Amino acid sequence: MDRRLLLSMLSIGAAQTLVGCANGHAPAATTAASPVDGPAGHRGGAQSRSGDPAAAASGSGPASSTSADPSSPPTASATATTPPALPPIPPPHPGPPRTVFQAPAPTRRIALTIDDGYDAQTVAGYVEFAQRSKIPITFSPNGAYEAVWSRHADVLRPLVESGQVQIGNHTWTHRNLVSSRTDADIRADVERNEQWIQTTFGITSRPWFRPPYGSHNAHVDALVGELGYTKILLWNGSFGDSTLITPEQLMGLASRYLQPGTVMLGHANHATILGLFAQVERLIAERRLEPVTLDTMFGTSRAVG
Ligand SMILES: [Zn+2]
């Protein structure tokens, strides 16, 4: 199916499947089988968002200082220069899994969620972008690319400590979970990644789990829920860069989807984004959006897990 047609058809359900870490791969089972946080169909699809007056709102200065919500906590740009010490890794809290894909309530917040990391140059670019812009980002790296990520651990660590950067679990291997894999194999894939995240970044990824390709079902959700991953993270906006696209295509999707309340999916896999960080940053500021981590958007905490 043509991408443009796909986009025109976009609904919440389609958003979950759209360009999720796939290289032309169609998710095998993307039906949200577990309970869904937030009003399903709240957005009514992408087309209803194109006329959002917020998109036309102009503003200057960083999003964090132009937030329309004065009760919002400051973003990491306003945190102290000495980050607080990281809390001890909490034990898992198994429970019923819930699928989330957008902010839980009307807000100007957005969550930038960046996955995978198989291209070293792009990972380096994202790390530099986070460090320079101070924009909160949630990375969900695969430990399979540890050689790429671990070289940035020293730079990322203080950003993690300050709360600007959060780490989610996207499995070690990025293999599809909805297949003939055994439960033990799936558990090992998730827990190996968690161990690497703890060792490398000093925090737990719990309770946040993003299934590779957005592919999940009730069985997979229950399995990871037993491991303490009770937030099954999907998305309702995407840079579309799980495959190689042009800068124009990427900015078109950024313009379409960077709207209040979006959980935005991106990938540290292709260099297209590297020349566009300033434009994305400008878009966020112009729309008075407030980038936050998942913890901030959903009230979770690495201290609790
Ligand atoms: Zn992925």
Image: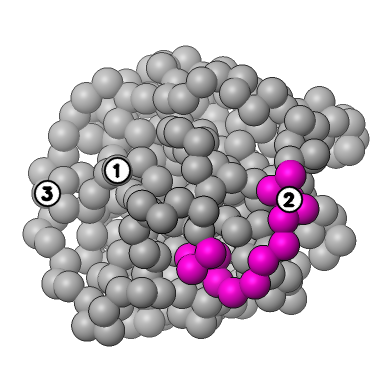
Distance between mark 1 and mark 3 Cα atoms? 16 Å
Q: Residue 232 placed where, x, y %?
A: 41, 33
The amino acid type found where label 3 is placed reads Pro
The residue drawn where x is 34% and y is 58% is 73
Cα distance between the residues tagged 1 and 2: 26 Å
Indicate the position of residue 114 as horizontal and vertical percent values.
53, 56
The mark found on residue 55 in the picture is: 2
Residue 189 visible from this viewpoint:
no
Please tell me which residue is depicted at 67% across the width and 66% down the height of the picture. 59
| Foreground disc of the pair 1, 3 | 1
Marks 1,3: beta carbons within 8 A? no
Q: Earlier in the sequence, mark 1 or mark 3?
A: 3
Q: Quadrant of the C terminus?
A: top left
Q: Position of residue 166 (x, y in %)?
A: 36, 59
Looking at the rendering, which quadrant does residue 79 occupy?
bottom left
Tell me the SS state at disc 2. helix
Foreground residue, 219 or 241?
241
* Residue occupying the point 61% across, 20% down: 41
The residues colored magenta run 53-66
Residue 299 is labelled as: 1
Q: Which residue is mark 3?
A: 90
